[in-house]
Amino acid sequence: MSQSLSSSRRCFSLLILILTIVKTYSSSCSSSSTSFHCPPFNSSPPFPFSTSPGCGHPHFQIQCSSPRATISIKNLTFSLLHYSSLSSSLTLSPQLDSNQNNCSSLRFSSSSPNRFIDLTGSPFRVSDSSCSRLSLLRPCSPLTLPNCSRCPQDCKLLKNPGRILHGCESTHGSLSEQGCQGDLLSFLQDFFTRFGFEVEWDESQDPYFAKCKDCRVKNGVCGFNSTHPRQDFICFSSQRETTTVNNHVAVLCLIFALTCLLLAISVAVAIFRSRRASFLSSVNEEDPAALFLRRHRSAALLPPVFTFEELESATNKFDPKRKIGDGGFGSVYLGQLADGQLLAVKFLHHHHGATAADTEHCKAFSMKSFCNEILILSSINHPNLVKLHGYCSDPRGLLLVHDYVTNGTLADHLHGRKSAMTWRIRLDIALQTALAMEYLHFSITPPVVHRDITSSNIFVEKDMRIKVGDFGLSRLLVFSESTVNSATSSDYVCTGPQGTPGYLDPDYHRSFRLTEKSDVYSYGVVLMELMTGMKAVDQRREKRDMALAELFVSKLQMGLLDQVVDPLIASDDDGGVAAVAELAFRCVAVDKDDRPDAKEIVGELRRIKSRTRVGEDDVAKC
Ligand SMILES: *[C@@H]1O[C@H](CO)[C@@H](O)[C@H](O)[C@H]1NC(C)=O
Ligand SMILES: *[C@@H]1O[C@H](CO)[C@@H](O)[C@H](O)[C@H]1NC(C)=O
Ligand SMILES: *[C@@H]1O[C@H](CO)[C@@H](O)[C@H](O)[C@H]1NC(C)=O
Ligand SMILES: *[C@@H]1O[C@H](CO)[C@@H](O)[C@H](O)[C@H]1NC(C)=O
């Protein structure tokens, strides 16, 4: 199979070469341009996007720039945070003004004076889920307005937050105080820069696409007259400059492409057969209908606020029989909402001496931060992270509601039920966990430090894919505690619950800070668990071997790794185990600067995985 893969790769690179030659002869709007880096696109932006004026759709002209491309819609410039070709959606982050006069940066010099961002007249509309999230925003009462003659825009916005995005005005008449924003302006600034809002476009509603369809039927390339004020549609004929020589090249190219296609199909079929089981679920996930449903379900789930009564009845009054876990931060119950949906409800260990002041939540400074944090965490979206669906802050308890993952935790699999996981599966779990960590550390600004990466926080699905849970949780807890203790405590980072013994960065005792590299340390311990099947801390072991990190490192240094590697995987080792052991060793380095970062870990694991041949037993299963 690898032979056919490499030959198909060679075939494709030759094809690309030919296409580049052909391209130099054809019109400048040819869709097959050489690829260049233009994030968030993987290569050159696909139609209807374009980087050269006159090509593509006039409203989809983008500027490639670092770190993100920008798009201009009705004289407002937005950074592109994300693009999905599947759902025809873009995530936009408006470029904020610099901070003047101590007003917020939420000033947009749009043409319509009463709206902040108004997309009407463009092909874009704000997605339902972004809209419902924003329409729920409201400031807490009593409203404290800034100096309205100095910051007129901020005043307008606070009086009517729905104005920020045209079409997303609040439809909720009487909202409770729960979930209100004490500092709405900072929240919005933070939200827009970190997550942006999603816009969609509908090709069937836009006349450009209808004309383009006809144009393409005639083998034309869609563009527009960039010098005309109306930017009229133009169908460029790709045959315009074609010569007979080019025709020959084209015919050759076609034959070549067909050969390649056949080869690619046969390779794809082979791969598909061998991985049918694991592919099936991911294919389902990308089904447009499923995507649609998911988007609307998440909109229906908003607001991300549940009442205590709702969650009490969902869990049958926190029935001990429904308890599915006991983490460092609280107990987890299986909950069933009125609509039948299964969710995990985490009852966080009670705030110390909850007082009446708690019901005034969101008014105190720290509670505001707490609410912001929850809203931000609930916006995080990664296939390997448990999704936070909402929360409930009530004098009776603080509850978080997240995905219910069916197949137990990694700790259950490694130490409890002793399900025989092959080395390949373990390597896969290591990689997925690293991807989740990379996302938290590198794809979100400011980065989120998980603070409690342990095998009990890695949840396993039926198909052995994993989701990491409880991220950012310790910080949430500290926020809620400081509400009670003091509203001014600024050193909250130092007072929080500090991870789980056996996984805790030794550097913490020196600096009293948990950083990304602390997550890397904990991750290193999880890698060791995956390799040895031993617990991170086991009091049945001798005192100096109690902590797995120490035991593992000493065995590795003595060259006695075989003594600790799980016998279950020692047999199907083909070189990967030693490399992963080396990686784990670097992750638990005492000096945090010696530890690799999450990006490096992902790269290293990918390399190891590509070197690991498909095990015989995996092939036999097909
Ligand atoms: C965009 O700005 C230009 C010049 O500043 C102005 O002439 C034009 O009318 C504006 N267009 C819109 C849609 O506001
Ligand atoms: C802006 O705020 C800072 C601190 O809050 C204050 O010292 C400064 O005088 C303010 N500037 C203006 C122009 O109001
Ligand atoms: C509001 O700002 C204006 C202009 O900067 C200033 O003249 C006025 O005194 C300020 N009012 C208050 C109440 O601070
Ligand atoms: C584009 O528009 C200009 C006038 O704005 C016109 O002179 C020109 O002929 C148009 N080009 C095409 C190809 O239609």
Image: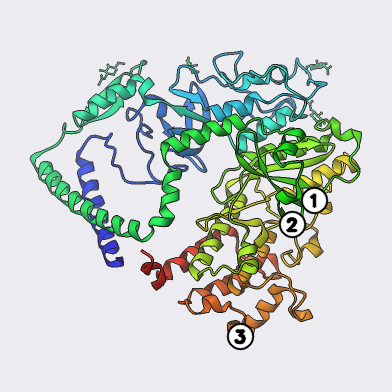
Under tag 2, what secondary structure?
A: loop
In the displayed structure, 173 sits above or below 245; it is above
Q: Are marks 2 and 1 in contact (CB under 8 Å)?
A: yes
x, y percentage for residue 344? Answer: 66, 46
How far is the residue under mark 3 from the one under mark 1? 39 Å
Q: Is residue 189 above or below residue 619?
A: above
377 left or right of 120 in image: right
Amino acid type of the residue tagged 2 in the rendering: Leu
The disc at residue 392 is: none
Q: Secondary structure at mark 3?
A: loop
For the point 41% across and 30% down, the residue is: 61
Tell me the residue that label 1 is attached to: 493
- Nearer to us in this view, 417 or 111: 417
Using the rendered image of the protein, determine whether residue 614 is visible from the camera's viewpoint. Answer: yes
Q: Position of residue 392 (x, y in %)?
A: 75, 37
Residue at mark 2: 514
Ligand 3 picture quarter = top right
Q: Amino acid at mark 3?
A: Leu
- Of badges 2 and 3, the one in the foreground is 3
Quickly name the residue at label 3: 560
